[in-house]
Amino acid sequence: MSHTQLEGNRISFEVGESNLSQDQRSALASIAETIQAIDQIATVLDMTPRIQIQGFTSPDGGREINQALSLQRAKAVLHELADISVRAISLQAVGMGPFPHEQSLSPTGTGVSHGRQVGFRVAVAPDRVPESYQ
């Protein structure tokens, strides 16, 4: 199980929406399994995974509206993952505003219209700093 498998996932949204559909909830159940596997592997290695849930919008609309909507989307995913029993301490919701490209690609190669999506970034760090670095 690798972080690239998680980072390749996208949850797409309708224009101006931050509510999750039933299809999105089903996709998040699979994503939750991937997150839990990453967490288990990291625990064995005495590491802590930190997963950033990044919300994006299309470039349409004002900067403030897009920033707020992108954060609402990220938080909707965070709350759903927390409801599925993913450790919330390792998750962080971040609103990124408009996606930097007109279209992004999902893992299947199909376009996600105008960046209305949530993506994932994974960082893994040691649980404690080795004595040699103190």
Image (tube, rainbow, N blue to C red):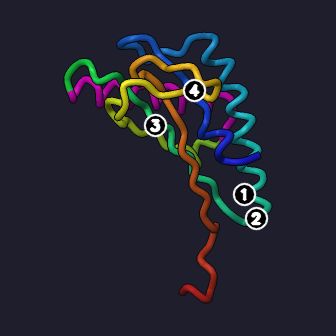
Mark 4: amino acid: Ser
Chain-order first, disc 3 or disc 2: 2
Q: Residue at x 20, y 23 (%)?
A: 62
Q: Which residue is mark 2?
A: 45
Q: Which residue is mark 3?
A: 54
Residue 134 in magenta? no
Evaluate if marks 4 and 2 touch, with contact meaning CB atoms under 8 Å apart: no
Cα separation, mark 3 vs mark 2, equals: 26 Å
Quadrant in the picture for the C terminus? bottom right
Give SS at disc 4: loop
What span is colored magenta in the figure? 63-86
How far apart marks 4 and 2 lie (CA) works out to 30 Å
Contact (CB < 8 A) between labels 2 and 1?
yes
Residue 62 disc label: none
Name the magenta segment's main secondary structure.
Answer: helix
Q: Which mark is nearer the camera, 3 or 4?
A: 4
Q: Earlier in the sequence, mark 3 or mark 4?
A: 3
Residue 79 lies within the magenta run? yes
User: Dot 3 surroundings within 10 Å: few (below 14), some, or many (20 or more)?
Assistant: many
Residue wearing tag 1 = 42
Residue contact between numbered discs 1 and 4, judged by CB atoms under 8 Å: no
- CA–CA distance in space, label 1 to label 4: 26 Å
